[in-house]
Image (cartoon, helix red, strand yellow):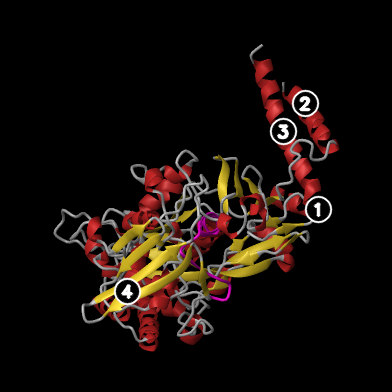
Amino acid sequence: MKKLVSIVLMCLMLLGVLSGCAVDSEDKGAIIPVSISKEMKAYDPVPMIYDAELVMNTGVLYEGLTVVNENGKIEKGLAEDWYTKIDEERGEYWLYFEIEEGTSWDDERYVQADDFVYAWRRILSPSTSSPAACLLYGIKNAKAYKAGDVTADDLGVYAESDSLLKVEFEGPFDLDLFLEAVSSPALVAQREDNVAGREDSWAASLDHYAANGAFTIKNLEMGESVTFQRNAVYGREKTSDTAVYKVVKPWKLTQDFTLSIEENIEKFNNGEIYYISRFDKETYDAYEKKIDTQDLLSVYSYFFNTTKAPFDNQLVRQALSVALDREEIAELSLGGKPATGLVTYGVHDTKTSKSFRKVGKDLIDTNANLEKAKDLIKQAGIKASDYTINIYTLRDEADVAIAEYTKEVWEGLGFKVKLSSGGGRNYTNKLYLGDFDVIGIDYQGLTTDAFSFLAPFAKEYSGEAIDITAEERTATHVTGFDNEEYNALIDKAFNTLDNKERVSLLHDAEEMLIDLCPVAPLHFNVNSYMKSKKLSNLEFSGYGFTIFTEAKLKNYEESNAVIIAEEEARKKAEIEANKNKNK
């Protein structure tokens, strides 16, 4: 049977290639095989703060009201304009977004103001865990709604019409900061008809999925492949319906998850894959000189569960952190940079032209200091051998390698260390339920403003889900961290309108957080990639992910013919195999 299928497949592939584009005579644009990331279990933007690769994918599929370009500048996204109405005497502060007419979801339903109202209500719901909530706290009743003290109808976000979104603020607000906030990949529009009632499943299949970005998911075969296809109605008012290819140049981006990293590299070298950003240590070392990098707003970190001994002791957390060599960890990360703070490169300071990281300087020594670690443990008054530390990570090769290195170092300090890994729902449950000792995460910046990195560690700004029937209605950060001085510092920064003072407070907050050490930043993530010489016009978001909207592939007609023929041959071979099976 397998032999018969192979013969049929080969014959049909050959026929397809010989007939050029006869299989599909319309030239729709380039089909670009890529390897962007590992397979995603779901394409929901809400939990993306803990997965840098999810950001790379959702950035292709969604567009916010505004976008941040590679230089950190705010540009128009789905909002074609915005304006404010302020009456200080009456204490009324309003911001209006005009959504571009004709902007559509991939099923041709217009993107409406109500889609943002629903999305932001979902994030601020007491039952939702999302650190993105703090980005919306300037909105009237946002904090009160998150605390369960008012209903969703009291939230100051309204759909004045299908294309006019009205936002009411508690008081004076910084327009530029809010325009930056709504560029966040976590604050994009969502469809209530798709999401409501199926929050945990809607983004894992095509049954209830819709995208409003340059691409949409056309084919999704879990464990096998995914196809991002041009959203034919993206920006359709910018050009005529018959010329949508001028807006989004490629026809499809295809990813095959059945291929190993080595097989992807082989196909790249053979001219069958044109962009690749997935490597293991062997392939990274072999191609390092050919690999380009782009800074991501993401730092791979260890979260300590501060509610458990010995991690409830600040000195122990400090000891575990300073014992680790960030230079060595960066080598294990396949392209990452040693973390010198929690806030990454790409985050602006008082101006977009100034780097928060450079102004704040190095807060973490990238070299290990074992003597200091031992002294801190002694000061903490504990016996290290009395404790077993379980480090939980995703299954990524680099994460596991870092965990194995960490195990060796911490066992050298006298601790007992166990390693475990997983993914999907099991991983997120451990994180959000606090079922961990130490957990490795991609801590994702939600905007190019340092506040989004630092605020979630403050109790009132954590965004964690709460039980509205409980007496205590404010949840701590997932680490259980709660420090009154830090909470007050973040609250002061949030309520400060003077930009220089605000940024200065955020620098103070980062220094304090590194000292209190509920989190140990290990390496700054980067988008490491290779692209074919045939592929051009790639752009990058201010968040670091690759933008393929304008991508051009030289002589794509030839590769299209082969790819289309392979697909047609595969389908016909499957039909033939099923026929023979039923004989």
Disc 3 from disc 2: Cα separation: 11 Å
First in sequence, mark 3 or 2: give its number: 2
Which region of the structure is painted magenta?
55-72
Does residue 172 appear to the left or right of 78 in the view shown? left
| Depth check, front residue: 98 or 226 | 98
Label located before the other in sequence (4 or 3): 4
Any part of residue 434 in sight: no
**Residue tagged 3:** 568
The residue labelled by disc 4 is 314
Location of mark 2 (residue): 8
Mark 2–mark 4 Cα distance, whole angstroms, equals: 66 Å
- The residue to which callout 1 is attached is 555
* Location of residue 465 (image quadrant): bottom left
Instruction: Name the front one of labels 2 and 4.
Output: 2
From the viewer's perspective, is the residue at label 3 or at label 2 nearer?
Answer: 3
Q: Position of residue 80 (x, y in %)?
A: 49, 66
Q: Kindly identify the residue that appears in the image at 19 percent across and 55 percent down.
A: 468
Judge depth for marks 1 and 4 and give the one in front: 1
Q: Secondary structure at mark 3?
A: helix
Residue farthest along the right direction in this orientation? 18
Which residue does the image show at 33% across and 61% down from the upper left? 478
Q: Earlier in the sequence, mark 2 or mark 4?
A: 2
The residues tagged by marks 3 and 1 sit, at their Cα atoms, a distance apart of: 21 Å
Specify the quadrant that holds the N terminus: top right
The reply to whether the C-beta atoms of the residues labelled 4 and 3 are less than 8 Å apart is no
